Amino acid sequence: MTARVPAVGVIGTGAVGQAVCGAVVAAGLCDRLLVASRTVEQAAALVDDLDDMRTSLGSPVRPAAAEAEELRACAAVVVAARAAFTNTRSRDVRMGGAQANSPVIRFLAGQFTGYPGTVLVVTNPVDLLTRLFAEVSGCPRAFGIGSSLDTARYRLTLARLLDVPVGAVAGHVIGEHGDAHVVCASSTTVNGLPVPVPLQQVRDELTARPGRINAGIGRTRCGPAGAVTSTLRLACGVEDGTTELSAPHGEAWLGIPVRFTGGQPLPSLPPLDAAEARQLEAASSKLRAAYPAVRGVPLQPLPSGRNGP
């Protein structure tokens, strides 16, 4: 495709940051890709690797190393930075990074005070940390990637269970990007028609899939990169469409469908049955209760360690 976005920035050169940068270059999404990391050497090394990729592909994207504050000139910035910590949780796994990652997000948010562009937060727990970034920075277009990946996994899983093309499946996963996700089975369709959804099989796969990927290759990376790249197309006005993003809903931030038209977002919650509405309120209550502890973590210098969620 012809590059239509002047510049996109990515903060973080860990597994997910690398995958996001590679996907942006392969998609030819922008003219310039600015990469920021903990050190100039990390960013420069990834840029060299990306230059090799764009030369082979003939991509129009020109990558360059930059400081985080230089990314304010970009139309959109992807935050894929994380602290170094060991997550020992077996349940509510994504919540395990709350205390470690919140100082990283607060530090970066302070560098983007009043930034008018789009920010896509990837760092977990993404619903809490997107809200933190938005409140500290005052950025009006901060969204979290999470439920968009859950929805992609849902559509793929259901397509396999029903033996239909994945493109025929339309449906959403909303709520928390975590244990309190909500499968919108009541509004799911195949080829435009309602279908019975085998909910237990779907939930089992949505729960098991991330752990299976992490156990095999250490971290999910390609799936999040795909979700980020498709969302950048929408948020930057390259194309219109709907995706599921962490955004304000009631008194919490959680995953809801957001419709982009010409780059302008409009929350578009699907109709929910009674059980789904209760599950969404439970997810909201959980995130509201967890947020004060994240918001109250003192600001610290950017911790040392690997980047990428």
Image: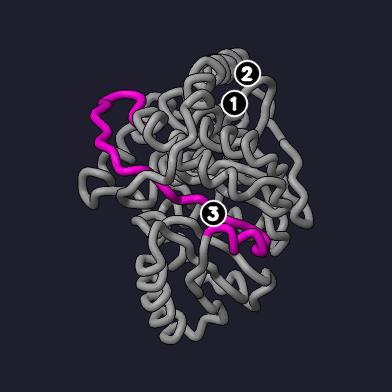
Q: Nearer the viewer, mark 2 or mark 3?
A: 3
Q: Which sits in the foreground, 94 or 268? A: 94
Residue under numbered circle 1: 186
Query: Bounds of the magenta span?
Result: 68-94
* Dot label at residue 273: 2
Cα gap from disc 1 to disc 3, whole angstroms:
33 Å
Residue 235 shown in magenta: no
| Dot 1 and dot 3 residues touching (CB under 8 Å) | no
Q: Regarding mark 2 in the picture, which secondary structure is present there? A: loop
Q: Which sits in the foreground, 261 or 115? A: 115
Disc 2 packing (10 Å; few <14; some 14–19; many ≥20): few
Residue 305 horizontal/vertical position (percent): 30, 49
Sequence-wise, the earlier of marks 1 and 2 is 1
What amino acid is labelled 2 in the image? Answer: Asp
Residue 85 shown in magenta: yes
Residue under numbered circle 3: 78
Residue 9 horizontal/vertical position (percent): 56, 62
